[in-house]
Image (spheres, grey):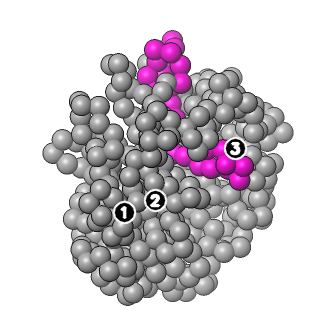
């Protein structure tokens, strides 16, 4: 299943990229603090000029800092960025920081979702950094090119130690996905926040800039991904369950541009704007969601105990009403593994025309599928590429018109460390 031949064929590695020209970069080859090779890939972004930003957390002066490096189109460090190729800083003096997902706006501004240790506790507060392609902070965003989001607002608590998502809208405003808790009983809750291009909360969005992703019966909700649709509506994915239940269902929620519930989505009049995908005696999580084409959407995730070896993959096509999309797998959710070794489902998703790419699972497979739910035989070996490694997928990003960047964190003897693969795609 491993693809060693560097031919330019779909599923083969890009032979022009990386220090060994084999389509692979280990994060330890870019970031080296002399202390540990176990460093996770926490964010990646492809820029219009073909360069790539990658983000991780580094130790500097005995304190964790967020660190962003810029690689040119060949995967070599671009020393014109930041300080000799790196932007390594804190959000607040003497308080540890961490890196996260990055996005770029139409105006060229780059945003990174990260975290900063709270000054009065061991908790982590969410933070957003704004900078340009040279690694310079953009001063008119927040304070000194950043905002730090208070960990507690009224009865809401935001958990900055959990991975978040960030998206930039055409007008330069930002959506931030967060998870936290609410109320005296501290029920786990997903949130969607909106900030304007200067980093100020958009008070007309939801309730003073925040939408609570809230189901009845004191349900637990956790968000994993967000997609801004071509018409401006917002699609969220994750999982939810009643507080009294052992099992979760895959959660989909659609919002209008102003953060209000989209009432035509979902089929339950008691929970308009939501769809839950449940399976008896199983946990279901939807980890990624995307717009396949206007009015047609695809979510990816897993069925089974989270992280368990008996979990299987799930791909679900649906439409504007949350009903199954008849054009994907004949209107039936696609459940199961794509190889005997594939477990724990899918973590990342990318679509382009009729080509669907899903990545993840404990064995970190990358698969190419067609809308009819079949593996694409033109990609890799029978539609699948594997590198005989274990870990978790971080991201799947399009590179130019014919390649794909796969970002993952691999379990090794020294711990978990980031690896970047660039493949040709169909």
Give the residue at x 50% y 65%: 399
Query: Which marked residue is nearer to the observer: mark 2 or mark 3?
Result: 2
Q: Disc 1 vs disc 2: Cβ atoms closer than 8 Å?
A: yes
User: Is residue 107 something one can see in this rendering?
Assistant: yes
- Of 180 and 406, the residue lying toward us: 406
Closer to the chain start, of discs 2 and 3, is: 2
Disc 1, SS: loop
Residue located beneath label 3 in the image: 174
Give the residue at x 66% y 44%: 109
Among the 4 quarters of the image, the one containing residue 202: top right
Q: Position of residue 304 (x, y in %)?
A: 37, 60
Q: Position of residue 363 (x, y in %)?
A: 27, 62
- The magenta stretch is 91-120
Mark on residue 93?
none
- 354 with respect to 253 (left or right): left
Disc 2, SS: loop
User: Is residue 183 something one can see in this rendering?
Assistant: no
- 301 with respect to 413 (left or right): right
Magenta-drawn stretch contains 338 = no
Q: Position of residue 412 (x, y in %)?
A: 20, 48
Disc 3, SS: strand
- Of 135 and 222, the residue lying toward us: 135
Residue located beneath label 2 in the image: 73
- 22 with respect to 73 (left or right): left
User: Which quadrant would the N terminus be assigned to in this image?
Assistant: bottom left
Among the 4 quarters of the image, the one containing residue 144: top right
Residue furthest out toward the right = 204
Magenta-drawn stretch contains 113 = yes
Residue located beneath label 1 in the image: 17
Q: Disc 1 vs disc 3: Cβ atoms closer than 8 Å?
A: no
Closer to the chain start, of discs 1 and 2, is: 1
């Amino acid at each position: 299943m491993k693809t060693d031949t560097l031919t330019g064929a779909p599923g083969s590695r890009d032979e022009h990229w990386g220090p060994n020209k084999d389509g692979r970069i280990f994060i330890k080859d870019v970031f080296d603090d002399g202390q540990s090779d176990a460093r996770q890939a926490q964010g990646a972004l492809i820029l219009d000029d073909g360069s790539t930003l990658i983000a991780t957390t580094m130790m500097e002066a005995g304190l964790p800092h967020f660190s962003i490096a810029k690689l040119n189109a060949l995967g070599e460090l671009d020393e014109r960025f930041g300080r000799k190729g790196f932007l390594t800083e804190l959000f607040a003096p003497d308080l540890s920081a961490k890196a996260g997902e990055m996005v770029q706006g139409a105006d060229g501004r780059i945003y990174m979702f990260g975290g900063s240790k709270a000054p009065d506790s061991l908790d982590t507060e969410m933070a957003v950094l704004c900078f340009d392609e040279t690694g310079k902070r953009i001063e008119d965003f927040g304070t000194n090119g950043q905002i730090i989001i208070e960990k507690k607002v009224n009865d809401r608590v935001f958990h900055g130690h959990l991975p978040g998502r960030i998206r930039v809208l055409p007008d330069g405003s930002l959506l931030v996905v967060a998870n936290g808790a609410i109320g005296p009983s501290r029920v786990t809750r997903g949130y969607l926040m909106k900030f304007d291009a200067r980093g100020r909360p958009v008070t007309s969005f939801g309730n003073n800039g925040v939408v609570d992703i809230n189901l009845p019966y004191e349900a637990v909700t956790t968000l994993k991904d967000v997609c801004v649709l071509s018409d401006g509506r917002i699609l969220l994915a994750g999982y939810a369950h009643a507080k009294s239940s052992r099992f979760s269902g895959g959660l989909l929620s659609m919002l209008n541009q102003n953060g209000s519930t989209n009432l035509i989505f979902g089929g339950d009049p008691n929970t308009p704007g939501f769809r839950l995908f449940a399976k008896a005696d199983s946990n279901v999580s939807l980890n990624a969601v995307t717009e396949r084409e206007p009015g047609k959407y695809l979510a990816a995730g897993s069925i089974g105990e989270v992280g368990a070896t008996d979990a299987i993959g799930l791909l679900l096509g649906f439409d504007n009403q949350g009903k199954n999309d008849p054009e994907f797998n004949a209107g039936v959710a696609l459940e199961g593994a794509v190889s005997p070794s594939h477990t724990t489902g899918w973590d990342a998703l990318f679509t382009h025309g009729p080509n669907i790419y899903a990545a993840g699972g404990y064995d970190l497979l990358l698969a190419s599928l067609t809308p009819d739910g079949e593996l694409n035989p033109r990609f890799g070996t029978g539609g699948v590429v594997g590198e005989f490694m274990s870990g978790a997928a971080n991201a799947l990003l399009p590179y130019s018109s014919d390649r794909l960047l796969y970002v993952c964190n691999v379990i090794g003897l020294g711990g978990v460390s980031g690896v970047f693969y660039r493949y040709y795609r169909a």
